[in-house]
Image (spheres, rainbow, N blue to C red):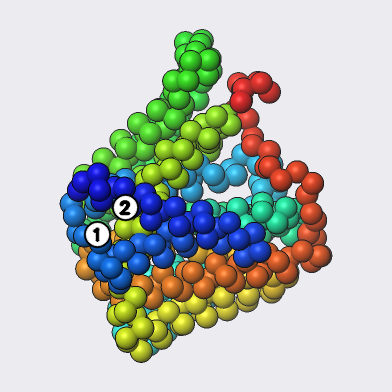
């Protein structure tokens, strides 16, 4: 690892904002970052060595930060979302139920002996992918709230189940680690709430606001990396650690400056590094050179859309909502990152999974476009979402 390599990766990551600048397609940043990684990595120019130990570790940090951001951005304190939990939970249950036979069928057809992996890929949704597109198009209303609840609950369920599904051994230890991480995260949530309501904590946070200490972010990162340390000690994926730490931040409630600081450190370096590295590890040539891998890509993409359209029909949502909810990115990226590291997937299969995810993003873009004018959908005047305040946060706490 060198500054030259770091410079190359950061520059490659800039392709994400360049491609995402297209308002018409609402393409997420990660698409451009993965494409840049493909160009400079194993599939293209071979300018970077994805097996470099330091790069692998920094990529894992980026992976943990990605899951932390997904958890932190979940609108867990939104009253409207809470009122839609019943429909969202029903839609999620139907997604997973329908995906069970689909998962076994895909495992048989592709000869990848992991029905659970396909179950998750077909049933999951991506909060971090869909929410920016909904905000970009200024969509609101009851239909959007119900769809969002479905996406959030499905996202959480899939992320929690992923470490067990992708376990290659020591399942008991992995499950025990997940339970311990969850318990520690609950303890951290209680401690954070106590700190927020204490006189000392209130004073320190006020000083942090005035002097730019980023105290809330520091505490959250301490929780994130502490949980990640526990996860690696038990052989559990950092998926659980990152997601749990992010959920703690979301449930505590954070000021606007926290999210600005988080975006700076995560989206400024670590998350783009993860996606560029992920793109560098997969091999697109192996995917296009193998009918089996192309079939894998198409089967995942078609099955995912079919499952979500069916669920939308069953719960009374428009087909556009099903297309919107079919978007994936975080979970497929996690599947490929874990699968490549554990030898569960080869680079060609990893490329097929990522390509299917990219197709789902295009489907989501089409779905959100069709939601405009759909029953129960409105156009909101304010582009910026209203972030829920912590219990002790004043209106001036920005």
Indicate which disc residue 289 carries: none
Q: Which mark is residue 48?
A: 1
Q: Is residue 318 left or right of residue 47?
A: right
Q: Secondary structure at mark 2?
A: helix
Name the N-terminal-most of marks 1 and 2. 2
The residue nearer to you, when weighing 317 against 340, is 340
Q: From the image, which quarter does the C terminus lie in?
A: top right
Q: Residue at x 58, y 43 (%)?
A: 76
Q: Position of residue 12 (x, y in %)?
A: 38, 56
Q: Between residues 182 and 264, which one lies in front from this camera angle?
A: 264
Tally of numbered tags = 2
> As drawn, is 375 to the left or to the right of 290?
right
Dot 1 falls on a residue whose secondary structure is loop
Give how far across and how far down residue 263 sits, in percent.
49, 40
Instruction: Check disc 1: other Cα within 10 Å, few if <14, some if 14-19, many if 20+.
Output: many
Label 1 and label 2: CA atoms lie apart by 8 Å
Front-most of residues 201 and 85: 201
Does residue 323 appear in this view?
A: yes
What percent of the width, then of the height, locates residue 317? 72, 68
Percent of width and height locating residue 120: 44, 67
Cβ–Cβ below 8 Å for labels 1 and 2? Answer: yes
Mark 2 neighbour density, 10 Å: few (under 14) some (14–19) many (20 or more): some
Residue at x 25%, y 44% (from the top left corner): 3
In the rendering, which numbered label is found on residue 8?
A: 2
Residue under the point 77% across and 64% down: 372
Which residue does the image show at 36% across and 73% down from the upper left? 351
């Amino acid at each position: 690892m060198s500054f030259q390599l770091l410079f190359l990766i950061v520059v490659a990551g800039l392709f994400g904002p360049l491609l995402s600048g297209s308002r018409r397609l609402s393409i997420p940043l990660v698409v451009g970052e993965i494409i840049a990684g493909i160009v400079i990595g194993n599939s293209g120019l071979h300018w970077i060595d994805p097996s470099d130990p330091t790069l692998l570790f920094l990529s894992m940090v980026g992976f943990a930060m990605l899951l932390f951001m997904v958890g932190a951005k979940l609108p867990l304190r939104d009253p409207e979302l809470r009122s839609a939990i019943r429909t969202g939970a029903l839609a999620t249950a139907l997604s997973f139920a329908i995906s069970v036979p689909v998962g076994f069928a895909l495992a048989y057809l592709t000869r990848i002996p992991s029905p659970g992996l396909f179950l998750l890929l077909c049933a999951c949704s991506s909060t971090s992918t869909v929410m920016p597109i909904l905000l970009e198009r200024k969509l609101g209303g009851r239909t959007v709230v119900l769809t969002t609840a479905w996406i959030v609950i499905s996202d959480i369920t899939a992320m929690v189940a992923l470490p067990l599904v992708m376990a290659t051994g020591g399942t008991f230890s992995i499950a025990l680690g997940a339970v311990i991480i969850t318990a520690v995260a609950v303890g951290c949530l209680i401690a954070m709430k106590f700190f927020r309501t204490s006189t000392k904590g209130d004073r320190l946070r006020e000083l942090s606001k005035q002097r730019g200490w980023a105290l809330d972010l520091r505490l959250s990162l301490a929780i994130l990396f502490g949980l990640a340390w526990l996860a690696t000690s038990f052989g559990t994926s950092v998926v659980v650690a990152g997601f749990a730490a992010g959920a703690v931040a979301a449930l505590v409630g954070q000021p606007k400056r926290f999210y600005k600081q988080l975006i700076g450190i995560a989206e400024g370096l670590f998350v783009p590094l993860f996606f560029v590295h992920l793109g560098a590890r997969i091999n697109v040539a192996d995917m296009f050179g193998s009918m089996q891998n192309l079939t894998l890509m198409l089967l995942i993409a078609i099955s995912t859309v079919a499952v979500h359209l069916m669920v939308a029909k069953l719960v009374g949502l428009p087909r556009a909502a099903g297309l919107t909810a079919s978007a994936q990115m975080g979970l497929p990226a996690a599947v490929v990152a874990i699968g490549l590291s554990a030898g569960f997937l080869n680079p060609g299969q990893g490329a097929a999974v990522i390509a299917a995810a990219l197709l789902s993003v295009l489907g989501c873009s089409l779905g959100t476009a069709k939601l405009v004018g759909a029953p129960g959908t409105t156009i909101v005047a304010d582009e910026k979402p209203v972030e829920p305040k912590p219990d002790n946060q004043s209106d001036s706490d920005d």
